[in-house]
Amino acid sequence: MSRSPTAVQVDRDRIERIVRDVVANRFAPRSATGRPPLMVNISARHMHISREHLEQLFGPGAELTPFKPLYQTGEFASEQTVDLIGPRRRMLHSVRILGPTRPQSQIELAFTDSIALGIDVPVRMSGNHEGTPGCIVLGPAGHIVLERGVVRAQRHVHMNLADAEYYGVRNGDPMDLVVEHPTCPVVIRGIIARIHANFKLEVHIDTDEGNACDLPRATGVRLEKERK
C-alpha cells in the first residue's frame, strides 16, 4: 500500500520526538564522576524566524504557538511549519519553526536535506549568513523569498561559565564529542563551544551526524577539549 506524503511526515515527526526523548533520558543525569550533566540532542531541520517574516507567512499579528519546550530555557518548537522551495521546484515540506522570534531568519538543514532541496548549503555558525544561499519559504498566508540564510549548522555545544571553566575552554574553542557504542564508537570533532551565563550544557548535531554515530543506541557520551 502506498503512503501519502502527509502520513510519511507525521511518522518522521513522531520518530524525531521519540529519539529526542530517548537521548534525554539516557544522557541527561549527572555523572558519578562529578562531570557536568551533558545533553546531546539531534537537531532536525528547522527555521528561526524574524517578526517581519512571521507576519508575512502567517498573517498580521501572528504569534508562534509553543508545541514543545526545548532544552535551553525559553526556547521551544512551535506548532507552525513552513514549506521550502528550492531550484527546479524541489520542496521540503513541514519544516518546523523554533521560537522565540529572532532578529533575522535562518534555516538549518542537514546535508541530505540540502541535496533533497537542490541547493549547496555551507556549514556556518548560527547568524553567519555571508555567502549562504536562500530559498522560497511558503506559509499559509503568503511567501517570502529568503535571499540568504540557509545553512548547515556547525556542530556546537552550549555551555555556561562554570561548564567552560570545568572543560578549560573559551568561546569558539573546538571540542571532541566521544560517543561510546558497542559496535561503532565514534569521536566527532569540531564541536564549537558557545558560552553564555544562561546556557545549559548541550551538544547539537544534525540528523545526518546523529544517524552516522547511531546516537540513540549509544551507551554513553562525553565531551573533551579537542586534542592538538
Image (cartoon, rainbow, N blue to C red):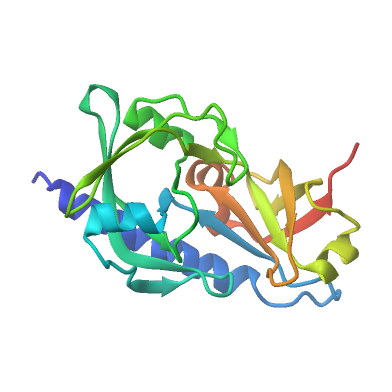
Percent coordinates x, y for residue 144 in the rendering: 28, 42
Viewer-side residue, 193 vs 20: 193
Q: Is residue 98 left or right of residue 130?
A: left
Q: Is residue 53 left or right of residue 157?
A: left
Q: Write the residue at 76% across / 68% down.
A: 160
Q: Write the residue at 32% across / 57% down.
A: 54
Q: Write the residue at 69% across / 55% down.
A: 157
Q: Write the residue at 17% across / 54% down.
A: 140
Q: Is residue 88 left or right of residue 108?
A: left
Q: How many numbered marks appear?
A: 0
Percent coordinates x, y for residue 17 in the rendering: 40, 65
Percent coordinates x, y for residue 108 in the rendering: 47, 44
Q: Is residue 93 visible?
A: no
- For the C terminus, which image quadrant? top right
Viewer-side residue, 21 vs 75: 75
Q: Is residue 223 visible?
A: yes
- Examine the image and state in which quarter residue 221 appears: bottom right
Percent coordinates x, y for residue 143 in the rendering: 23, 44
- Examine the image and state in which quarter residue 71 appears: bottom right
Examine the rendered structure and indicate whether residue 31 appears above or below residue 167.
below
Q: Is residue 208 left or right of residue 37?
A: left
